[in-house]
């Protein structure tokens, strides 16, 4: 999708600042002088800017927050917004400053004076992320944002730094759009079609239909979708930007476009949010879009299992036994523990076909992870300490909360079944961990693997710092950072 707001980088022009009729945004910090280009404005405002920056009210603001002067006398601007941001601010503070600007942005646009601030590109990134709106199904005129001009000391240098971030923002928006879509729009067919359209960006995209999945032996995945009129699919997206023949990083996503729970049906209260149960597949899609848009120098394959979990006369029942692509049999204790059945077959397929250097799956897998970590952190499970550490480092650098969770033989033993090789659910205690242990049974010993349970962070109940209420796109920034830092050729 196009960016919701157009951002331009320009040279500093004091005359243009003084003539701005929309919003005028300046940076300040207690103890630091206002930028030279703003001093002429301050004279026209009879020292109001300097007084505001020196005020007790401004000092109480947290970095990235703002104080506003409405309809300032002496200037045609409709408002002057003074954002607290020090010259040595962190990336998180700079992005928060951008988000603060975005939340006040309207049709008149804004002119932002960042001058020589070294994080001007990060401010613009935070602004772009927070300006996102999902209004596809609302009647009436959509919300309109005016253009935003950044006055910077070196427009070309800032634009160069911002260019890959624009690709990253578009990947985040793509994920948010997918997660926000209702299930009567984002069917498995529609989801697959949106991914197929990314062929135009340079991705190789294959869609495996039910006949091919049956031939591959994906009985676990097909069992989940057999009660739905929407056909189950697996979509394979390949980006070949690295060295020829180099094993790819594999990203695997759970794509349950709607989850009723099946025969083990969920309570009605809150079931409408199960449109987001394809969040893992959405993140994989957003990462692949970002890699293509920025021309990443890495080999990455994204594979998503697309199904719908519905309770009709054909639906699988508690007590059924299904056979996975790996060949292991699974007793279905709870049809609402369906995501792990989808992932089991896709994980095995990814390893059999691509023999990846490492594999990461993402899924809105368990309510248990929300009980454990709330909506602030995704759960990280891994069989490889180095991979887990790299993911946590990338998440920390991007400001996306993540926390490593334990695994072990004691949890794995709980998966024992009376009638099959394993069961898909063992009840509520340690529910997120036993789900991860189930997935681990479909990971080969020599494959570095991590599982990210994003149930709490994909669609939190309130707005976040960089996203309005709704889908966050959590994970696109983390995985893009992980790929840039650890998998791209130099």
Image: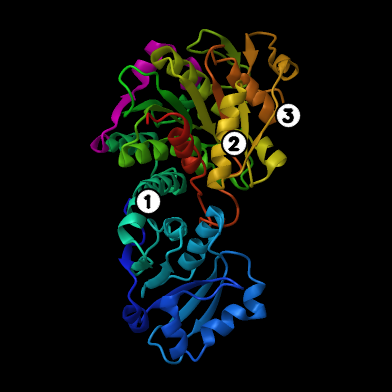
Q: CA distance from mark 1 to mark 2?
A: 24 Å
Where is residue 289 shown, x and y percent of the image?
Answer: 35, 39
Of callouts 2 and 3, which one flags the residue occurring earlier in the amino acid sequence? 2
Give the mark toward the camera: 2 or 3: 2
Of callouts 1 and 2, which one flags the residue occurring earlier in the amino acid sequence? 1
- In this rendering, is residue 64 above or below 368? below
SS class of the residue under badge 2? helix
- Tell me where the magenta segment starts and ends, as one range: 199-222
Query: What residue sits right under mark 1 in the picture?
Result: 161
Quadrant where the image shows the C terminus: top left
Q: Quadrant of residue 379?
A: top right
Q: CA distance from mark 3 to mark 1?
A: 43 Å
Of callouts 3 and 1, which one flags the residue occurring earlier in the amino acid sequence? 1
The answer to whether residue 287 is visible is: yes
Determine the residue positioned at 45% across, 58% down.
Answer: 118
The answer to whether residue 71 is visible is: no
Q: Are marks 2 and 3 in contact (CB under 8 Å)?
A: no
SS class of the residue under badge 3? loop
Residue nearest the viewer, comparing 69 with 186: 69
Is the residue marked by circle 3 packed among few (<14), some (14-19), or many (20+) residues within 10 Å? some
Where is residue 307 shown, x and y percent of the image?
Answer: 45, 30
Where is residue 221 shown, x and y percent of the image?
Answer: 48, 21
SS class of the residue under badge 1? helix
Query: What residue sits right under mark 3 in the picture?
Result: 430
Q: Which mark is residue 392?
A: 2
């Amino acid at each position: 999708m196009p960016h919701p707001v157009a951002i331009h980088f320009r040279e500093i022009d004091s005359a243009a600042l003084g003539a701005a009729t929309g919003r005028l945004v300046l940076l300040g910090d207690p103890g630091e002088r206002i930028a030279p280009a703003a001093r002429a404005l301050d004279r026209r405002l009879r020292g109001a800017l300097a007084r505001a920056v020196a005020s007790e009210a401004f000092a109480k603001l947290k970095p990235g927050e703002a104080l506003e002067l409405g309809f300032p006398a002496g200037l045609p601007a409709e408002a002057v917004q003074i954002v607290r941001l020090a010259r040595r601010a962190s990336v998180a503070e700079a992005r928060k400053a951008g988000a603060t600007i975005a939340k006040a942005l309207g049709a008149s646009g804004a002119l932002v004076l960042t001058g020589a601030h070294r994080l001007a590109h990060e401010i613009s990134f935070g602004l772009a992320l927070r300006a996102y709106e999902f209004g596809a199904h609302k009647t009436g005129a959509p919300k309109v944002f005016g253009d935003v001009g950044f006055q910077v000391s070196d427009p070309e240098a800032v634009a160069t730094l911002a260019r890959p971030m624009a690709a990253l923002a578009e990947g985040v928006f793509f994920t948010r759009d997918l997660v926000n879509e209702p299930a009567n729009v984002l069917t498995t067919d529609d989801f697959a079609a949106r991914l197929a359209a990314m062929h135009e960006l340079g991705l190789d995209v294959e869609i495996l239909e039910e006949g091919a999945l049956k031939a591959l032996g994906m009985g676990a995945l097909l069992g989940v979708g057999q009660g739905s009129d929407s056909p189950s699919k697996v979509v394979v997206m390949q980006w070949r930007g690295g060295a020829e023949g180099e094993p790819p990083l594999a990203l695997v996503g759970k794509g349950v476009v709607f989850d009723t729970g099946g025969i083990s049906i969920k309570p009605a209260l809150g079931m409408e949010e199960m449109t987001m149960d394809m969040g893992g597949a959405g993140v994989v899609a957003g990462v692949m879009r970002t890699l293509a848009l920025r021309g990443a120098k890495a080999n990455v394959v994204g594979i998503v299992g697309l199904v719908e979990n519905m309770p009709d006369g054909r639906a699988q029942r508690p007590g059924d036994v299904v056979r996975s692509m790996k060949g292991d049999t699974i007793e279905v204790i709870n049809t609402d523990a369906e995501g792990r059945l989808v992932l089991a077959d896709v994980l095995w397929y990814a390893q059999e076909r691509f023999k990846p250097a490492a594999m990461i799956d993402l899924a809105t897998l368990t309510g248990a992870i929300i009980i454990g970590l709330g909506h602030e952190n995704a759960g990280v499970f891994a069989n490889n300490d180095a991979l887990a550490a790299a993911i946590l480092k990338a998440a920390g650098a991007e400001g996306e909360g993540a926390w490593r969770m334990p695994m072990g033989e004691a949890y794995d033993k709980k998966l024992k079944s009376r009638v099959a090789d394993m069961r898909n659910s063992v009840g509520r205690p340690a529910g997120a961990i036993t789900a991860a242990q189930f997935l681990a049974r479909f990971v080969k010993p020599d494959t570095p693997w991590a599982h990210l349970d994003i149930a709490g962070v994909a669609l939190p109940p309130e707005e976040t710092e960089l996203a309005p209420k709704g889908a966050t796109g959590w994970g696109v920034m983390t995985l893009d950072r992980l790929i840039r830092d650890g998998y791209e050729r130099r």
